[in-house]
Amino acid sequence: MEKERTLAAFAAVMPAFAIFQDARRQQLMTELCCKEELTVNELTATTSLSRPAVSHHLKLMLDAGVIKVRQVGVERRYSPNLAPVIAQLKELTTALES
């Protein structure tokens, strides 16, 4: 095991680990993965969170890069952006296994 490679892989994936420590963000990501793309109002309707709370969590997830947003008219549609996180996790597991 290369310690530097492993530590770098841990560092790369830590933002995703940190963002998903919160059960509400786990719930929002699950909804997004099931439906592929949702607005704040649609997410609010599927959770017990208020609209401001959903918006807050979406902003944190967007900043962490685990979701993306697409403007459609006046709506902002959110969707998962997990490919980079999955690549980071694969790099971490490879580093740990070597």
Image (spheres, helix red, strand yellow):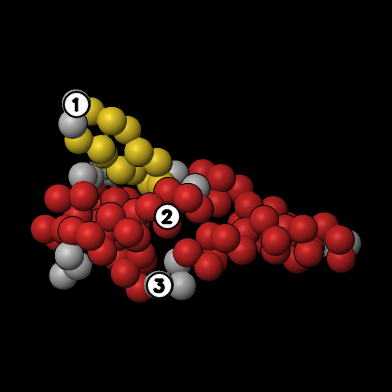
Q: Amino acid at mark 2?
A: Met
Image point (79%, 62%), residue name: 6
Q: Secondary structure at mark 1?
A: loop
Q: Position of residue 76 (x, y in %)?
A: 25, 38
Question: Which residue appears farthest toward the left when viewing the image?
Answer: 45
Image point (47%, 50%), residue name: 63
Q: Quadrant of residue 12?
A: bottom right
Q: Position of residue 90 (x, y in %)?
A: 64, 54
Image disc number at residue 48: none
Q: Secondary structure at mark 2?
A: helix
Q: Amino acid at mark 1?
A: Gly
Choose the circle earlier in sequence order: 1 or 3: 3
Q: Position of residue 18 (x, y in %)?
A: 53, 68
In the rendered image, which residue does mark 1 sit on?
73
In the rendered image, which residue does mark 3 sit on?
22
State yes or no: discs 3 and 2 in contact (Cβ < 8 Å): no
Residue 87 higher or lower than 89, as above or below: above
In the rendered image, which residue does mark 2 sit on?
61
Image point (20%, 35%), residue name: 75
Whole-number angstrom distance, CA of label 1 to CA of label 3: 31 Å
Q: Residues within 10 Å of mark 2 (few under 14, many from 20)?
A: many
Q: How many marks?
A: 3
- Res. 67 in view: yes
